[in-house]
Image (cartoon, rainbow, N blue to C red):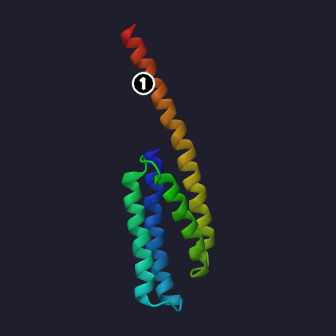
């Protein structure tokens, strides 16, 4: 799960940065406000990459997805991109857990074969 979720978060990191550039030029918000919000979200993406396997990290990731969708009120395209990244986040979590379960099953099977 860690690899898939981290890949999604790194993609979001770049999208948030580019959205910050767009918001800086097209919205009525101050540059400081745009980069404070964008910077916090970008740092959160990076921190979550290292914390994905810890308890509560997936829920924080969902909060980030909601924030990304809501940023569409500032940059309209973010409604679509946020929804796409929310779908990617769901797929990363869902299929990542399946991969982790399969790895654990194969490891247990290999351990049982070695001990037999």
Which corner quadrant of the image does residue 66 belong to? bottom right
- The residue shown at (37%, 10%) is 115
Is 12 located above or below residue 23 in the figure? above
Q: Residue 72 versus residue 7: which sits nearer the camera?
A: 72
Categorize mark 1 by other alpha carbons within 10 Å: few (<14), some (14-19), many (20+): few
Instruction: Determine the residue positioned at 49% across, 76% down.
Output: 19
Q: Is residue 12 above or below residue 110?
A: below
Which image quarter holds the C terminus?
top left
Name the residue beneath numbered marker 1: 107
Q: As rendered, which of 88 and 55 lies closer to the eye?
A: 55
Q: Residue 3 at x, y = what percent? A: 43, 47
Image spot of residue 106 (x, y percent): 46, 24
Is 40 situated above or below 85? Answer: below
Residue drawn at x 61%, y 56% is 87
How far from the left and from the top, in percent, is residue 59? 52, 55
Image-based side of 108 in relation to 59, left or right: left
* Left or right: residue 105 compared with residue 91: left
Secondary structure of the residue carrying numbered label 1: helix
**Looking at this view, is 2 or 53 the one in front?**
53
Answer above or below: position of 64 versus 102.
below
Apparent side of residue 67 relative to residue 18 in the rendered image (left or right): right
């Amino acid at each position: 799960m860690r690899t898939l979720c981290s890949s999604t978060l790194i993609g979001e990191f770049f999208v948030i940065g580019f959205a910050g550039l767009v918001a800086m030029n097209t919205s009525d918000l101050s540059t400081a406000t745009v980069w404070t919000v964008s910077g916090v979200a970008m740092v959160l993406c990076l921190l979550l990459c290292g914390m994905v396997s810890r308890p509560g990290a997936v829920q924080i990731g969902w909060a980030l997805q909601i924030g990304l969708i809501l940023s569409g009120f500032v940059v309209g395209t973010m409604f679509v991109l946020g929804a796409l990244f929310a779908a990617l986040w769901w797929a990363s979590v869902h299929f990542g857990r399946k991969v982790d379960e399969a790895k654990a099953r194969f490891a247990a099977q290999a351990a049982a074969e070695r001990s037999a």
